[in-house]
Amino acid sequence: MTIAILGGTGDIGEGLTLRFARDTDHDVIVGSRDAERAAERAATYRSQLDKHGRAADIDGRANAAAAAAADIVVAAVPPYHLRETIESVTDGLDDETVLVTPAVGMSRDDAGMHYDRPGAGSVTELAASAAPDRVAVVGAAHTLPAARLADLDAELGIDTVLVGPTEPKARVAALFEAVEGLRPVDAGPLANAAEIEAVTPLLINVAQNTDGLDQLGVRFQ
Amino acid sequence: MTIAILGGTGDIGEGLTLRFARDTDHDVIVGSRDAERAAERAATYRSQLDKHGRAADIDGRANAAAAAAADIVVAAVPPYHLRETIESVTDGLDDETVLVTPAVGMSRDDAGMHYDRPGAGSVTELAASAAPDRVAVVGAAHTLPAARLADLDAELGIDTVLVGPTEPKARVAALFEAVEGLRPVDAGPLANAAEIEAVTPLLINVAQNTDGLDQLGVRFQ
């Protein structure tokens, strides 16, 4: 299987690329608006993995080319770029492609981080509304700590919560299940995404206010 | 110290009463709108604890009398009774009393459970607006699984997230810290409560959709 990480040069994109490339046998393609930047970053990731004793197959391409070659496309871009990023790659997506969205809208005020719930109900549903009907959309990875994911020496022991239609969600769950220390759990349909997205600012608030906690993920137990 | 659990005959009230009475040396008072019902339930809890080898000091009183005698008052009532319950006990609260609110507003649709965010910003802030200014309000215990809490044979290993002003929050944190298997973590001021309250429906959705998970709490790690 081939996984494209659109925005694979960004923080959560970096972590997902490195973990998928290290822990699975899937081909991983780093996507970026700039093909050259994608290729450079793919080389950096290959060299990082090489230091961890893993000869990984990571390619770098422009977002549309990355998406067109992939079975699972992760749109690891900020929420304000999500719609345009999805629209820019849809021509290359077929009805077997699964689009995964980890984006969350947040803002900071004096008290801390807050979830900005969009009119679509959630950022995950916003992504679904931007994708053509033939493409299945699954929400995942909203609550994964980016820097810890990108640090291959860091242990995880955390969950990622999935929402979306059953069969595509099972394919995405199998992908995350293969990442060491990551457990996929299922929160049901896309309409349940807002309650997941609200956890991301909460994790930042807890880390900010509690001694000894940082780069937090969540475990349901 | 004396802890009053208003609505201590309800599900989350039962769990908090039993755990506080078993794991701390504080006096616990079960509050109810009906003093007789409170007294009956207190006797039931004492007998449950007795079977677990613990001779606990649990009293039962009408909500206002319970609150007036307590240092920490937990308003363990449904969100739609929260304002009237707080208003009915405020005469007896002094400026040393800390009011703790675990209530969350939720509704169910075809997809699952959803967080109903009130106009006040959160149910926790709604409680704060119902309390007199002299009484400190702390949000806690929103995400604790009621039936598991009430089952004294069940292990916890989960967190409770606190919000509120610093000093009263530290007193409440110390109370929860004393409960075996429970770790208080701090999410900052009351204004950060909504992101905690959204976790409660999420826990129900994850348990509903994921094989082998039930009565979930959350651990930040």
Image (tube, coloured by chain):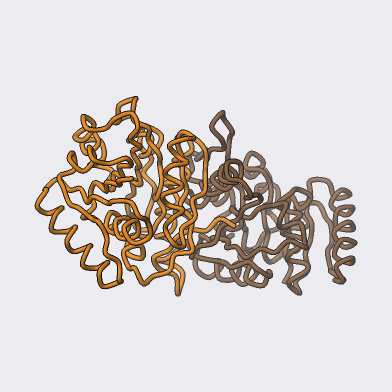
Chain colours: A brown, B orange
Residue A23: image quadrant is: bottom right
| B201 left or right, relative to B38 | right
Residue B58: image quadrant is: bottom left
Give the residue drawn at x 70%, y 64%: A155
Give the residue drawn at x 24%, y 46%: B6
Residue sticking out furthest to the top: B133
| B57 left or right, relative to A217 | left
Give the residue drawn at x 72%, y 72%: A1
Image spot of residue A202 (x, y percent): 54, 45
Is residue A86 positioned above or below A113 on the image? below
Residue A20: image quadrant is: bottom right
| A198 left or right, relative to B64 | right
Give the residue drawn at x 39%, y 50%: B142
Image spot of residue B99 (x, y percent): 33, 38
Q: How many marks?
A: 0
A203 or A65, which lies in front? A203
Is residue B120 positioned above or below A133 on the image? above
A156 or B20, which lies in front? B20
